[in-house]
Image (cartoon, helix red, strand yellow):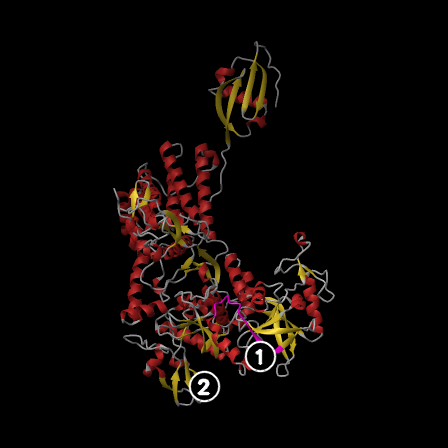
Amino acid sequence: MSMKVPQSGIQVAQRINKLSQRLIDVSEKWKPITLKGIQTPVGKINLVKNRPESMYILSMFPYPSGMLHMGHLRVYVISDTLNRFYQQRGHDVIHPMGWDAFGLPAENAAIERGINPKVWTEENIEKMKKQMNNMLANFSWERELKTCDPDYYKFNQWIFLKMFEKGLAYRKEAEINWDPIDKTVLANEQVDAKGRSWRSGAIVEKKMLNQWFLKITDYTQDLLQDMNILKKWPDKVKTMQHHWIGKSKGARITFETNCEEFKTFSVYTTRAETISVVQFIGLSYDHPIVTKFAKTNQDLQKYIDGIRDLPDDSKSGFRIPGIMAINPWTKKEIPIFVAPYVIPSYANEEGTKGAAVMGVPGHDSRDFVFSNENLPDEPINTCVKPISTMFLNSTPVPFTEKIGYMEDNTGGMAGMVTNEARKKMVDQMVEDGIAKKIDQYRLRDWLISRQRYWGTPIPIIHCDSCGPVPVPEKDLPVVLPDVHEIPTRGGNPLAHIHDFVDVKCPSCGGDAKRETDTMDTFMDSSWYYFRYLDNKNKSLPFAYDKASKNMPVEIYVGGVEHAILHLLYSRFVSKFLGSINMWDGKNCHYEPFNQLVTQGMVHGKTFVDPKTGKFLKPDELENAGDKMIIKDTGETPDISYEKMSKSKYNGADPDECITHHGPDATRAHILFQAPVHDVLSWDESKIIGIERWLQRIISITGKISEFKQFEASYKTPVEDELNEFEVEFHNEMQRYVRSITESFERCQHLNTVISDYMKATHLIDKASMNRKVRDDMIMFNLQKLISLIYPVTPSISEEMASTIKEKQPGLASWNHYQWPMKERMTEWPFKHYQVVINGRTKFKFVAEKNLFKKGMDYVYEYLIKDPVGRPYLVNRTYDKMILKYNIVSFVFKKPKKNKGHVNID
C-alpha cells in the first residue's frame, strides 16, 4: 500500500498519535508560563565560575523571510537552552531577538508584488514571531528591534557620520563588483571563488563607480592581534579571519626600465629569493605604464576594454611593446605584460593606482601557466631546489614549495635554505637602496554603497560648491521615502524620487542633492547587539553605562558562514565605538563577542533517481515496507543527506514537526541528532525515541508521587546510613548531574545532555521498581532530573513539577527552577565477604571495609558473634585461618583443646 510522503524530510506520513498528542497538550497547557522564562528567584549561590553575573546570550538575528527553516530552529534551540540554563544558575540573562529587516530579498519581493517592502517585511515578522513562540523560545521581547525602523537606522547614519568626522568614511571612484541580477554593488567578501554573487549566484561584472568606503584597514593590526584573546572562538573561524586579513611579510623592490618616461616602478613580493629567475613583469590593467602606452596603442586599449569580460582564471596577456624592465639582481632585461590575474589593488603603494608582480614561472603555478601561453618558446628557469632526496637529479617545474635549497644561479646564495637566502637578499637590496621591507595585508576597505532602495540612506548631501556635506546630526534620521512601488527605471531607485533628492546644502544654503546610495546591510548587523541593551534611547545608539556593564556578549550563537563578513565588520565597528568613548571595553580589547558557538548546517534526506540523477519530489516516492521506492519504476532511489534546498526537495518545515510532535520533543530531537558544531542530518522518523522518553518520565513522576507523603527537608544521608544500592544510585546520578552541567557550561556536545537525561530517567525508573533505594532518595533525585531537563523541555518539566506539588503538599514550596548543586561522590564503607570452610563456601556477610586490618582474632570473634556464622564455628577448633581479598578461609581437623596456628596472608 502506497503512502504519501510529507514535505518534511520525505519520511513516512506522520499522524498525531496518542503519545504525540499528549506531549502537544502538555506544551499548550504550559506555553504561557514557559514563554515568560523563570519568574521565581533562584538565588545567586550557584553562579557559573568565570561567567559574569549579568549574562548576555545572543543568537544571530534572522532576515524576516516569513518562514523559519530548520537552521533557524537549531540556532534558537541552542541559544534558548543556554538562556534557561543560566537563568537556573542565578544569572541575570539578557536574551533578545530582533530582525535584520533591510536587504535585497524584501526589495525584490516587493517589486514582484508591486508593494512597499515595509508591508511585506512587517507581515513576515509577525509570522516568524509566532513560529518562535511555537518553539517555546524565551526571548526578551521588550528589547526587540527592527533594522528598517527609522529609530534604528538613524544610528546607522550617526555612526557613519562619526566615521566621516574621523576620516574613516570616504568616497572614491573604484572598480566595483556589479551584480547584474540584483543590480547592486558587492563587496569583495560577497563574491565567491568562482566570481559569483553570494546572494543571486550571478557572474559578477566589473564597473567603475563613485562609492563610499569605511576604512577598516586602519584597524587591521588590532583586528589581527586581538584574535589572540578570543580563546572561546572556534579555531576554524579565527583561521578564516586570519586568511582574509592576510598579513604577509615581504619587500617592495624597485625595477628600472629602458623607457625614459617610466624610469622605475616597484613590485611587491614575498618571495624575494626568486628574483634571479624573474622572466616577466605582470601589470594590472590600470597601472600607469599600461595607461600611458594604451594612449598610442589601439590594440592595447582594445585588450584593456575587454579584460573585464575575461574569465577569472584567464592567463591571456598583452606584451607591451617599447618597454623592458631591468632585473635589479641580474641586470637582465625582461618583458612587461598586462596580466588579467594581477589584481589592481594588490599591494600597491599608498595613493597610487595599479599593481605589479614578478613573473616567476619556475616557482609559481599561475606564472607558469601564463608563461607557457605568452612566452611559449622561453625555457623555464628555477633557482630553488627541493630539500627532499626524491628529487636528487631533477627539480619539478613549477616547484612551488617555499622551503628548499638555493641553486647556483642566485648570486652567491647557492646551498642556503630559502628563508636564510630571502633575508640576506632583501637586506642586501635594502642596503643598496632598491628595496623596502613591507608588511602587506590582503584586507581592503569596506565598500558600503548599494544602489538599492530598501536600506539605510547614506547621510550625505552633494553640493557643487561645498562638495560632500554631512547631514547635520539634528536632522537625523534621513528617512527612507515611503513609496507605494519601488522605481525600477534603472540606476539608483532613490534617484528617481525628486522630493527626496532635491534639497538645500546645509553648509551654504544652495541647491544640492542627497546621496542616493544606501548602506550595505552588514552595517545594520555590525552593532545591533549594542542597541538591544538600550533600544528605546532616542538621542544615542546606546548609553555608555549600559554597554559598559553588559558587553561583551558572553555567548554568541550563529553560523560559521558569517566568519568573514558579519563577524569581522562587527569587530571593526565595536572597536571604533570604543575609540569614540561609547563604551568601556578595555578589558576585552573592545571585542564584542567573548564566546562564539557556531552550529553546523542542517542537511535534509535527499532522494535521487539512480538512472537519471534527477532529484525526486515527495509525490514521486512511496513507502514499500522498510524502504522508499520510486513510484514509476519501483527502483530504490539513492539516498543521501545534503544541504536543504527547494531544488532538491529535501526541506523540512519546523512548524510541521512541532505540530506533529510538540515543541519539547522537537527541541530535544534537534539537540540529540548531532553535536553542536557538526552537520545535523535531519531525520524526523527518529523522534519517536524522544517521545517515548518524555512519556516515560511523565509516567514515572506520577508513579513516584504516589509512594508516600514526602517532606521538603530531605537531604542525601551520610555514607554510614546508605546501603550499597543507594550509594551506587547516588553516585550514578551525580555523574549525570556533572556531565549535563559541564556540557551546558562549555556549550558543546549538547547531544550528550539528552542521552544523559535518558540514562538518568532509566536509573530512577529502575530504582522505583526494585525498591532497594529508599523512597525519599528516589523522589529527591527525580526532583533534580525535573530541574535538569527544564532548559531543553520546559513544558514537560513544568508538568512534572506540577504533578509532584499537587500530590505532595510537603513539596509545594520546592523551586523546581533551581539548578541542582553538585554533591560529592560517596563511598560505601562496607564490603561483602565470604567464609570458606575446608574448601567450600558456607556463608556470606557484610562488614566494614578494613575488617582484615584488625587481625585474625578480631575477625574470628566477629564471626563467632554473627548469628549466621556462629553455627559453623562454635565448639570447633580450626587448624588454619587465612584472610585473602574478601575471603575468610578455615581449615578444620580433629578437635583440639587449643587454637591452632594462625596465618595472616
Along the line of sight, the residue nearer the viewer: 420 or 341: 341
Label 1, label 2: how far apart the Cα atoms are: 31 Å
Relative to residue 748, is residue 19 depicted above or below? above
Please identify the quadrant where the C terminus is shown. top right
User: Measured from the top left, where is residue 81 in percent x and y?
Assistant: 39, 53
Q: Is residue 232 visible?
A: no
Q: Any mark on residue 289, and which?
A: 1
The answer to whether mark 1 and mark 2 are in CB contact below 8 A is no
User: Dot 2: few (<14), some (14–19), or many (≥20) neighbours within 10 Å?
Assistant: few
Q: Is residue 533 above or below residue 771?
A: below
The answer to whether residue 530 is magenta is no
Give the number of the mark in front: 1 or 2. Answer: 1
Front in this rendered view, residue 345 or 699: 345
The residue singled out by tag 2 in the image is 467
Question: Which amino acid type corresponds to the residue marked 1 in the rendered image?
Answer: Ile
Q: Which percent across, then down, holds residue 485?
A: 28, 74
Q: Residue furthest right?
A: 412
| Residue 70: quarter of image | bottom left
Q: Which mark is residue 860?
A: none
The earlier-in-sequence mark between 1 and 2 is 1
The quadrant of the rendering that contains the N terminus is: top left
Question: What's the amino acid at mark 2?
Answer: Gly
Helix, strand or loop under label 2:
strand
Image position, residue 171 (x, y; %)? 47, 79
Tell me residue 15's x, y (percent): 26, 46
Counting every numbered tag in the picture gives 2
Q: Which residues are magenta?
A: 310-323
- Seen from the viewer's position, the closer of residues 631 and 217 is 631
Drawn side of residue 464 relative to residue 413, left or right: left
